[in-house]
Image (cartoon, grey):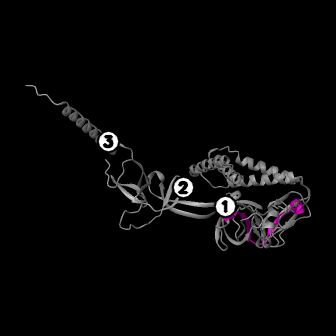
């Protein structure tokens, strides 16, 4: 006997079956997602964010231009920046020589110094890997400078590359042209002096630091002027209203700085001036000097009543080897920094009004709190060495921070 089911009962059973299938599919999907998704992690570590300010300022120093009876090319017997004593021979100045010949001698002197350094390097084949690394590093540094338009340090970096390439040539090539090039340049240099007429030896009339270059601002840019400088004086120099002394530029063969003390004067806009306090020391990075860093103390902070901001006077009493005291120089100075645990934004979640992240301990997902002390559009910095207040622990260093993953929760176990 065939039993007939009511139509309503059939519909109820079909609907129940559909619901059961949907629940099963939902459960299978989420179970599969728990164990089949990609989880990406990074090791948590410390990062530092610096606040760096840039400026262009002027060197002030007590210097005296040196003169000879002759105004031709000079053969210098002391390197720039050398400390000299009274009576020490500084240079032999020739009777003849124009600006072109002086420029030629300067160029030859610079290249001869690099070649001599290369020849006398004392390197062996065991040093070749390091030399190759230096060549590669200088090459890519120069490429980056050119791409960024950073021309301030290109000359110094190019000299480093030339030195390393010379050393490489000497090490790998038995017929390296370096020695011959050195002799040729020395001959060219002697040729300039042989046709320069009579000459006069020049001696130091006082002790100090000798430099072969003169820009004509030696009488104006003194330490006394710097220590009492006004905004009006600063702008006269910056706008070219103060002109260089023509005689010292054309007729002097060098200059003598009385001591190692000098000043650097720079204007900072109002938004930047607040970072600086008189009496504090700052690491000044001089861009055109191969990014040489010199600690300098802020001694004077004068209100800029012309354009706003402040005129800052920094003091130093050291002269780094090879530092070129060009009058106008670009600087970068780090005025503030904050350090914390680097946390990408993709790793951060908001839970109960707090910033949280997940870390992987073995195969277990564990929640951590972070205390944001700095943020950008891409990442946060979290305070370090924080103690738990009885709830969630804070993120520490050297933990596997999960930066990518779904369905994360405290206590989840991953296969």
Element type where label 2 sits in the image = loop
Q: Foreground: 395 or 66?
A: 395
What are the residue bounds of the magenta stretch?
Answer: 245-272
- The CA distance from mark 2 to mark 3 is 35 Å
The disc, 2 or 3, on the residue closer to the chain's N-terminal end is: 3
Crowding at mark 1 (Cα within 10 Å: few <14, some 14-19, many 20+) = some
Crowding at mark 3 (Cα within 10 Å: few <14, some 14-19, many 20+) = few
| 84 versus 122 height, above or below | below
The disc, 1 or 2, on the residue closer to the chain's N-terminal end is: 1
> Residue 292's mark?
1
- The residue tagged 3 is 32
- The CA distance from mark 1 to mark 2 is 29 Å
Q: Position of residue 222 (x, y in %)?
A: 80, 70
For residue 33, which quarter of the picture? top left
Magenta run includes residue 145: no
- The CA distance from mark 3 to mark 1 is 58 Å
Element type where label 1 sits in the image = strand
Q: Position of residue 219 (x, y in %)?
A: 84, 68
- The residue tagged 2 is 376
The disc, 3 or 1, on the residue closer to the chain's N-terminal end is: 3
- Contact check, label 2 and label 3, Cβ < 8 Å: no
Q: Position of residue 322 (x, y in %)?
A: 71, 61
Q: Quadrant of the N terminus?
A: top left
């Amino acid at each position: 006997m065939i039993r007939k089911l009511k139509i309503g009962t059939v519909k109820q059973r079909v609907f129940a079956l559909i619901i059961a299938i949907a629940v099963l599919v939902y459960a299978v999907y989420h179970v599969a997602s728990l164990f089949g998704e990609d989880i990406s992690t990074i090791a948590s570590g410390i990062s530092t964010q610096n606040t760096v300010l840039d400026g262009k300022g002027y060197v002030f120093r007590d210097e005296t231009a040196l003169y000879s009876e002759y105004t031709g090319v000079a053969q210098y017997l002391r390197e720039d920046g050398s400390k000299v004593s009274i009576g020490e021979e500084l240079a032999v100045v020739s009777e003849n020589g124009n600006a072109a010949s002086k420029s030629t001698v300067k160029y030859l002197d610079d290249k001869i110094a690099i070649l001599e350094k290369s020849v006398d390097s004392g390197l062996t084949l065991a040093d070749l890997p390091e030399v190759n690394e230096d060549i590669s590093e200088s090459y890519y540094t120069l490429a980056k400078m050119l791409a960024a338009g950073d021309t301030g340090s290109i000359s110094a970096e190019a000299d480093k590359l030339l030195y390393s390439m010379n050393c490489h040539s000497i090490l790998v090539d038995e017929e390296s042209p370096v020695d011959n090039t050195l002799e040729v340049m020395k001959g060219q240099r002697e040729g300039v002096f042989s046709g320069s007429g009579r000459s006069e030896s020049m001696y130091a009339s006082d002790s100090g630091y000798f430099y072969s270059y003169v820009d004509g601002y030696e009488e104006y840019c003194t330490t006394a002027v710097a220590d009492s400088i006004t905004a009006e004086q600063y702008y006269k120099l910056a706008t070219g209203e103060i002109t260089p002394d023509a005689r010292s530029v054309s007729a002097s063969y060098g200059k003598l700085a009385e001591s190692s003390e000098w000043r650097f004067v720079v204007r900072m806009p109002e938004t930047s001036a607040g970072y600086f306090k008189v009496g504090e020391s700052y690491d000044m990075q001089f861009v055109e000097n191969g990014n040489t860093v010199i600690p300098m103390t802020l001694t004077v902070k004068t209100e800029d009543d012309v354009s706003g901001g402040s005129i800052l006077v920094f003091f130093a009493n050291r002269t780094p080897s090879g530092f070129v005291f060009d009058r106008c120089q670009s600087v970068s100075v780090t005025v503030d920094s904050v350090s914390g645990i680097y946390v990408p934004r993709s790793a951060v979640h908001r839970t109960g009004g707090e910033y949280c992240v997940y870390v992987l301990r073995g195969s277990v997902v564990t929640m951590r709190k972070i205390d944001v002390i700095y943020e950008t559009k891409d990442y946060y910095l979290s305070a370090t060495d924080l103690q738990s207040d009885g709830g969630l622990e804070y993120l520490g260093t050297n933990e596997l921070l999960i930066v990518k993953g779904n369905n994360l929760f405290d206590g989840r176990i991953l296969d």
